[in-house]
Structure formats: C-alpha cells, structure tokens
Amino acid sequence: MPRKPKPSSPAPPPAPGVWAIKKRDRTWMVIDPAGALVCITLYKKGAPEVVRRLAA
C-alpha cells in the first residue's frame, strides 16, 4: 500500500530571542534569534548541543 503524504503546514517563525532548530533533508540547521543561519549539523543531537554551548 502506498503511504499517504502528510499534510504540510508551514512552521511558525521562531519567537524573538529563541534559537530555532529546523530539519533540512538529512541535516539540521541552527538559526539564531535574529534569523541568521549559525550552522548545519548532520546529527539531531548535535543541533541542541550547539545551541546549548552558544547560549551559555
């Protein structure tokens, strides 16, 4: 049986002052509160670690 596509709804923009982690294909993007791309990680656990270190 073919899989049913999931309904895609656009993600709401992050609140001001909040770091965002977004999935992109097989990578994870870390975006700072100003909306600038900080880095791209290959592993899901890497993105929160980057945010944790930068926010400290």
Image (cartoon, helix red, strand yellow):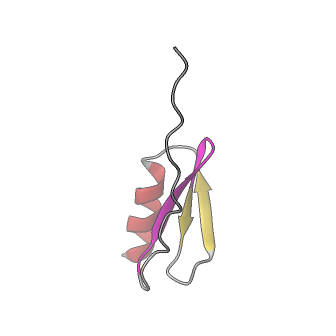
The single residue placed furthest to the top in the displayed view is: 1
In this rendering, the answer to whether 6 lies above or below 31 is above
Depth check: give the residue in front, 2 or 11.
2
Depth check: give the residue in front, 3 or 42.
3
The image quadrant that residue 17 belongs to is bottom left
* Residue found at x 42% / y 47%: 45
Depth check: give the residue in front, 26 or 5.
5
In this rendering, the answer to whether 13 lies above or below 16 is above
* Residue found at x 53% / y 62%: 10
User: Magenta stretch containing residue 24, yes or no?
Assistant: yes
User: Magenta stretch containing residue 36, yes or no?
Assistant: no
* Residue found at x 53% / y 51%: 8
Q: Which residues are magenta?
A: 18-28
Q: Position of residue 30 (x, y in %)?
A: 54, 64
Left or right of 6: which side holds 40?
A: right
Question: Magenta stretch mostly in which secondary structure?
Answer: strand
Q: Position of residue 2 (x, y in %)?
A: 55, 19
Q: Position of residue 18 (x, y in %)?
A: 41, 78
* Residue found at x 55% / y 84%: 34
The image quadrant that residue 53 belongs to is bottom left
> In the rendered picture of this protein, how many numbered marks are placed on residues?
0
Depth check: give the residue in front, 53 or 10.
10
Image quadrant holding the C terminus, namely: bottom left
